[in-house]
Amino acid sequence: MAKESIQPKINPWIIATAVMLSTFMEVLDTTVVNVSLPHIAGSMSASVDEATWTLTSYLVANAIILPITGWLSNYFGRKRMLLTSVTGFTIASFLCGLAPNLPLLVFFRIIQGACGGGLQPISQAVLLESFPPEDRGKAMGFWGLGIVVAPMLGPVLGGWLTDSYSWRWVFYINIPVGILALIMTQLFVFDPHYIKRATSRIDYWGIGMLAVGVGALQIILDKGQEKDWFSSHLITRLAAVSAIALVAFVVYELVVAHPVVDLRAFKQRTYSAGVFLMTVLGFVLYGSLVILPIFLQTILGYPALQAGVAMFPRGLGSFIAMPFVGLIMSRYDPRKLLIIGLVACSVSLVMLGTLSLNVGYWEIFWAQFLQGLSLGFLFVPLTTVTMDPIPNEKMGNATSIFNLMRNIGGSMGIALSTTIVARSEQKYTNFLGRNVTPYSPQTQTMIQGLRSFFMSSGSGAATATQRSYATLFGMVQRQSAMLSFNHTYLFLAILFVAVMPAVFLMRRPKRRGGMPVH
């Protein structure tokens, strides 16, 4: 039970730095391992599919802990919970680097994900409470840098560490950051007086149903495309288990006296609309993030590290926009800034959705840079407005649900975007392939040209003909892949336009701290 005490006056920006370190470390680990999977599989005599459980196990454990973080903070004390999470995450990172085989690596990743699940909502709650309402926009702009930039930096850092040293350094890199976060948290973060154990009763049924429902859902989203979705008996059974567990969880939490997750927060219209928009934001952010390196590598032929570097403009745009939006938040209605962000992000997705095989680097650069700028106008106002009606003593519960839905939205975005790309490529290959026949004059002209080229380079007549047809089919496949990426980006753009009306369901933020909202 946390004891009430007089809190020392500490500069809130020092507190923001302390919680930013732990959040950045945790978010970075959701993507930094991706590029190391082939190396992990090779060194542990496993297939790449088996190695992906190092990702799935982390995400499942992370998703289960996220929504109950508010309750855990009240039960054990927020500072104690934060220190425990950072300590567990750092130790688990060290053990992951030492893991001698895949089963132990997956086990340590589960511990890492469980400890990391509490870092985002606790950090966000501490940050929002440490600043007066009129300065929360600036604080969220600073904190948002970690949430948005870390997933973009992850593939670049992971690729460099793996190529230059070993995949084990992907985990070891967390150790100095974790130690620094521990020291700063111990020195500068304190529990507010209202963080106290309200009840000694533990909602075992709620925790159990939540763990089963969210865990099964995360496995479905992570493995669905690989297993061909509902053609797999495993995915079908998991879907049934997840649906039953989550529906039962919602009903139970609404009637139980001491719920582990207080869903009554959704009675606030602004909060409900904000959580919905954050789910969609996670969907689009992670969906577009995961398919861009695939596009750069498979279509444009970028090496893995260069593909990661080519994604830097989005992080640069966010780095510029986040602090700027935080500074102007107190002067303008945040809902207007949110609309600007939605429009700008939709435009950037249309720019990516209308690229061709002749695309140059700067076309990709400006589309990503605009998207990065738009994320600053999305993340900072959305978080600030959504949490505006939530009282401080309920902040931990609200931020837990908020972050959970962003992560679930991200998993859904990754799953659906990769599925759309794969299915659209098949459709366009069939469509374009129908027009490539020996009876088409254009096809005959192209085959004759290719055949002449291969024969001039020393190939025999039969070999030249085979190579001509293979080259032509390769051109069809490449064009089909390009169209499938166009199709996916335009779908994401339409999705953002479709959810814009939800902004108008959010109430104008209150006039607090003497700072009017214009």
Image: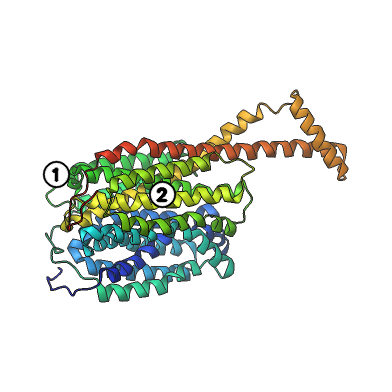
The amino acid pointed to by label 2 is Ser
* Mark 2 residue element: helix
| Residue at left offset 13%, top offset 73% | 6
Number of labels in the image equals: 2
Residue 45: % across, % down:
56, 61
Q: In the picture, residue 306 is in which quadrant?
A: bottom right
Name the image quarter holding residue 30: bottom left
Which disc number belongs to residue 374? 2
The local crowd at label 2, few if under 14, some if 14 to 19, many if 20 or more residues have their Cα within 10 Å, is many
- Residue at the location (42% across, 41% down)? 235
Name the side, left or right, on which 84 lies relative to 453. left
* Colour scheme shown: rainbow
Q: Nearer the viewer, mark 2 or mark 1?
A: 2
Tell me the tag on residue 255: 1
User: Residue visible at 18% across and 53% down?
Assistant: 203
Q: Marks 2/1: CA distance?
A: 40 Å
* Residue 318 at x, y percent in the picture: 42, 56
Q: Is residue 146 visible?
A: yes
- x then y, percent, for residue 252: 18, 44
Helix, strand or loop at mark 1: helix
- Side (left or right) of 262 relative to 370: left
